[in-house]
Amino acid sequence: MSQQSVIQQPATTPISDALFAQLRTTSIFSSLKDEELRCLNGLEEIRLQKGDILVRQGEIAHNFWVLLEGNMLLSQTMPDGREMEVTSIPHGNAFGELPLLANIPNAVNLRAEGFCHLVQINEEGFWSLMTTCPDVRKAILGNMAKRFQKMQSATIQQEKMASLGTLAAGLMHELNNPGAAARRAASQLRSNLQRMHELARGFSERGHTAEQRACLTALQDRVLAVKSESCLSSLQQSDAEEMLGEWLDGHHVAKAWEFAPVLVGSGIQPNDLECLSEVFAANELAQPIEWLEASASSMQMVGLVEDSVARVVELAQAVKSYAHEGQGGVQDVDVNESIHATIVMLKHKLREKNISMTKEFAAGMPKLHCICSGLNQVWTNLLDNAIDAVPATGGSIYVRTSMHGDEVQVAFEDNGSGISKEDQERIFDPFFTTKAAGVGSGMGLGIVRKILESYDGWLTLTSESGRTEFVVHLPKDQRA
């Protein structure tokens, strides 16, 4: 505490006439009899200059004050270190009773706005006042009630603002995924168009036979009919890419292992390309296959742009109907396709951390007759949490769909550090997060649970060191 001068007034020394007159003008002591006022215990005078600190936030409370002259500035230190001014205390007021009565540390900082003259009463003197002076006790408790009400109102307002800020930040985060995906798709489309222009020029100069045109046209019609990547399990996709990559490599096609995933995504298998190898010479085969790959990639990118725009529209509608749950279009949702689309949208985050993604989609999953935009948000939040949880190297995520009786289950498992037992009890509380500062808002899982409740579903958690699994439980028969 920085103070310019402190004058201590021993209990045995009578209060001076000047100080007596000043104390008499304050509301808290105005009702005391003269002999009661002159016998105050534990009293000392304090004089502060501008900027001097009387008490700091978090310190243990030991005193009660009456401000005789000047104004005191009350402020709070925020979690990020910023100091936020709350209010100003004018002269004639008493303060400091709340932490003494509640036995809590000081919740604020107190600093002199200019010259200030105060009377400080120590803890012993304060409790003497409370027990021997009913009028003072009544005034102090009245002040405390008013301050507590103001503090409660301020806290509620801060929580409202924090909630709005968190929801706005969450919305921007949700919008960023489809926005970034659409931007990357547009860039890939531009590249594909340039490649196809160069290939088309070469085709026009060289010309094609009727057999070559027929084979290439049939294959192109096939890949153009596919708007998005085929929904395959990780093992199925890996096997298909390896088979097609080996076929392309065996026919001396450059970029064979780069083309294979795109062609597999459009449902192309090695036997589908046999007609090309039959009508094109070995040294001519690369160009028609690159043309086919560019066509397939372009359609996939168009599908991704469409999905991204649809996702933005869904998010906008979700914001509009957040307070009016249940409004919106009902449709048949393929759970496997819905999760696959979410994984595609978050592929860039998986690549950034080099995460191994394993998908196990059960065959014959029933379609859910419901509003799908909420489920998309569930998948996004759970997958995004898993991505954040896995280590920087060697991260792996396992997504599994299955049927258990009349219940659809979707599991998201990661090999992160796990969630402690203590944190598991609070994981769904608003604003609680185990992520680093600035990474998590603490709202995601609470929103997930609220969405699942609207589907008559629920979420379970199993976590230990090196393994965390969230399982979504949804009734097969959804209410319309």
Image (tube, grey):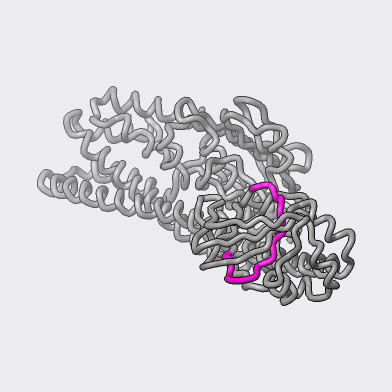
Q: Main secondary structure of the magenta part?
A: strand
Drawn side of residue 157 relative to residue 273, left or right: right
The magenta segment is 59-73
For the point 55% across and 54% down, the residue is: 78
The x, y position of residue 2, in whole percent, is: 53, 53
Name the residue nearer the viewer: 377 or 358: 377
The x, y position of residue 471, in whole percent, is: 68, 38
The answer to whether any part of residue 85 appears in the image is yes
Instruction: Please say if 100 is above or below 387.
Output: below
For the point 40% across and 33% down, the residue is: 269
Residue sticking out furthest to the left: 205
Instruction: Please say if 247 is above or below 364.
Output: above
**Residue 66 highlighted magenta (yes or no):** yes
Drawn side of residue 219 relative to residue 229, left or right: left
Drawn side of residue 141 relative to residue 176, left or right: right
Name the residue nearer the viewer: 251 or 328: 328
Name the residue nearer the viewer: 32 or 138: 32
The x, y position of residue 63, in whole percent, is: 71, 54
Quarter of the rendering occupied by the C terminus: bottom right
Q: In which quarter of the image is residue 325?
A: bottom right
**Residue 470 highlighted magenta (yes or no):** no
Q: In which quarter of the image is residue 271?
A: top left
Name the residue nearer the viewer: 40 or 351: 40
The x, y position of residue 109, in whole percent, is: 59, 57
For the point 52% across and 29% down, the residue is: 396
Instruction: Please say if 23 is above or below 254.
Output: below
